[in-house]
Image (tube, rainbow, N blue to C red):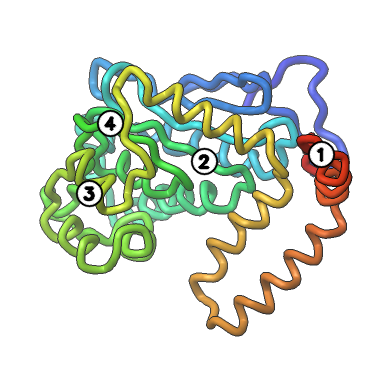
Amino acid sequence: MKYLEGESNTLAGNHLSLKHYQAQHFAFSVQGTVATITLNRPERKNPLTFESYAELRDLFRQMYYADDIKAIVVTGAGENFCSGGDVHEIIGPLTKLDMPGLLQFTQMTGDLVKAMRACPQPIVAAVDGVCAGAGAIIAMASDIRMGTARSKTAFLFTRVGLAGCDMGACAILPRIIGQGRASDLLYSGRSMSGEEAERWGFFNRVVEPSEVLGAAQAYAQMLADGPTFAHAMTKKMLHQEWDMGVDQAIDAEAQMQAICMKTNDFHRAYHAFVNKQKPQFEGN
């Protein structure tokens, strides 16, 4: 990872500035406190490589410590989101690896999803055109998904002789769209249209192609302007409560909410309400 001179990395790595991060295998920009990751190989519909997988994994891991990034947008250059793993740069080499090498690769791709779910910032995906394979997984692993009617989302692993259980798909996708619908997509590998994705709840909203990135960035900015410490707690509990019973979840939420009540943002909101003003949250 490369940083510009003067950036802080203090308190044994507990605080890290990523505003000037220089990505090597995709585009990265920051507007205010919203970071935008753009998969930018439009001539190939933005496929992933071994290197971009690893850099995305490492960047999302670093986001845990990035106090200057409050929300993240993921999108693709041109008119497509991501076509998945590059056939020539990933699929071909995989056919020549031994079992330890294959397991190392599949664990790395799974670690990308783990890093996306573990980072405290909400992730908003802006999806247009092709969103296939690992691209569909990246959209799935995001917190919010903005799409277009012309988008085509496909968990196409079975089309290349692989199982649909890739990168957490069998755990996460049913929780978004339901077991039956997830089974349909993961067994068949077929494409899901943008309208179908919105109807099934995979897309939170469908907008015009020219508006999808702006809509995602505006939503991310709204989140970044809010109580970001509390948002991080919400994301954490949305993820952790999958494995909890109802009583355990209620107890865990009671603890998290009590913690949030000790934040300055909670007190700012109270005083703003009393004074009939809009609260200005600072994430602490």
**Mark-to-mark CA distance, 4 and 3:** 17 Å
Residue at mark 3: 155
Q: Earlier in the sequence, mark 4 or mark 3?
A: 4
Q: Is residue 188 above or below residue 126?
A: below
User: Is 113 left, or right, of 258 in this rendering?
Assistant: left
**Mark-to-mark CA distance, 1 and 4:** 38 Å
Residue at mark 2: 123
Closer to the camera: disc 2 or disc 1? Answer: 1
**Residue type marked 2:** Ile
Mark on residue 276? 1
- Report helix, strand or loop for mark 4: loop
**At which x and y percent is residue 40?**
37, 20
Q: Residue at x 45, y 44 (%)?
A: 144
Q: Earlier in the sequence, mark 1 or mark 4?
A: 4
Q: Earlier in the sequence, mark 4 or mark 2?
A: 2
Front residue (pair 118, 97): 118
Mark 1 Cα within 10 Å, few/some/many (few <14, many 20+)? few
